[in-house]
Image: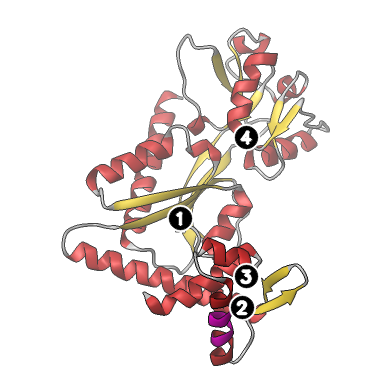
Amino acid sequence: MKHLLTFRLIEAVARAGSMRKAAEDMNITPSALVRRISRFEEEFGADVFERLPGGVRLNPAGELVLHHYRATSSDLARVQSQVADLSGERRGHVSIASSQAMLPYFLPKQIADYRALHPGVTFSVNVRDRAQAEEELASYSSDIALVFEPVYLVDFQVIHAIPQTVHAIMRADHPLAAKQELRLRDCLDVGHVAPTAKYGVRYLLDFAARQSSRRVSPLVETESFELIRHYVMHENAIGFQIPIGLEVVPGGPLVYRPISTKDMPAGSLILGQMRGRTLPVASARFAMQLATALKDYQLEADSRA
């Protein structure tokens, strides 16, 4: 799509913050890139970049241009996937903004199941916190989001939601492992490892702790739930995660115990998209598959309760 090349160059410059760096990224000479963007600005009738001592950044006009390009690209991808469906061969690309908890077990299975039926579809999974996920939807960087306790921006459209009770993660020989359900005070009175404030699990922990005049004071604070899961093996501390991101292994070294909803109400795992956007066929069908899988997961969880 040659007519979209200029827009791709503008996007590359906006991402890099530098004409020279963007030229390297796009395998074009800096002078050719500058000429192309200057010609576009002349034909467009307005500058799209603000020139700074250390580089460039989009001005308000450039933000509008880039939003138009992303919306156009999304519409084009949707038409391409519809045309592919006419021939009975589903193709396309699905981009997902996801909480970390979805990565170990849930999403790999769902993507593999979908690709077994539609091998022409490719995927990108972007690990994002609850605010970043919604920003990705708004910028068309991701088609769908699967996040725990999103911030709920105006443009977020919920496709499906299920409750998730925060669980404590600990070694099987931890003194609290004998309990089948934990009170929040049990967890905060011993050494604990917690995610940073931008994650939904920490948001719920902090909110619940304030209600009981306590504080979350982690020994280690991290953006990695994988680090939390492994760290508790070494110091015999307690970590926190939602159950969809956990694998119960009978007799294994780790155990997981729910924190009582008397202290901390369950949070919401949300599958959503940008409000008003018509997704490409591949993304829309995958979102439907995820919604069904989440319903099945919840039914199974309810049957075990």
* Residue 190 appears left or right of 146: right
| 222 falls in the magenta region | no
Say whether disc 1 or disc 2 marks the residue closer to the N-terminus: 2
Of tags 3 and 4, the one toward the viewer is 3
Q: CA distance from mark 3 to mark 1?
A: 31 Å
Nearer to the camera, 184 or 109: 109
The residue to which callout 2 is attached is 62
Q: Is residue 142 above or below residue 290?
A: below
Q: CA distance from mark 3 to mark 4?
A: 34 Å
The residue to which callout 1 is attached is 144
Q: Amino acid at mark 4?
A: Ser
Q: Is residue 143 above or below residue 44?
A: above
The tally of labels here is 4
Q: CA distance from mark 2 to mark 3?
A: 15 Å
The residue to which callout 4 is attached is 224
Residue 130 location (% of width, % of height):
61, 49
Residues shaded magenta: 34-39
Say whether disc 2 or disc 3 marks the residue closer to the N-terminus: 3
Say whether disc 4 or disc 2 marks the residue closer to the N-terminus: 2
Q: CA distance from mark 4 to mark 1?
A: 22 Å
Q: Residue at x 66, y 15 (%)?
A: 234
Helix, strand or loop at mark 4: loop
Q: Amino acid at mark 3?
A: Met
Image quadrant holding the N terminus, namely: bottom left
Q: Amino acid at mark 1?
A: Ile
The residue to which callout 3 is attached is 19
Helix, strand or loop at mark 1: strand
Q: Is residue 123 above or below residue 254?
A: below
Q: Residue at x 42, y 40 (%)?
A: 107
* Residue 135 appears left or right of 280: right
Q: Main secondary structure of the magenta part?
A: helix
* Residue 74 appears left or right of 133: left
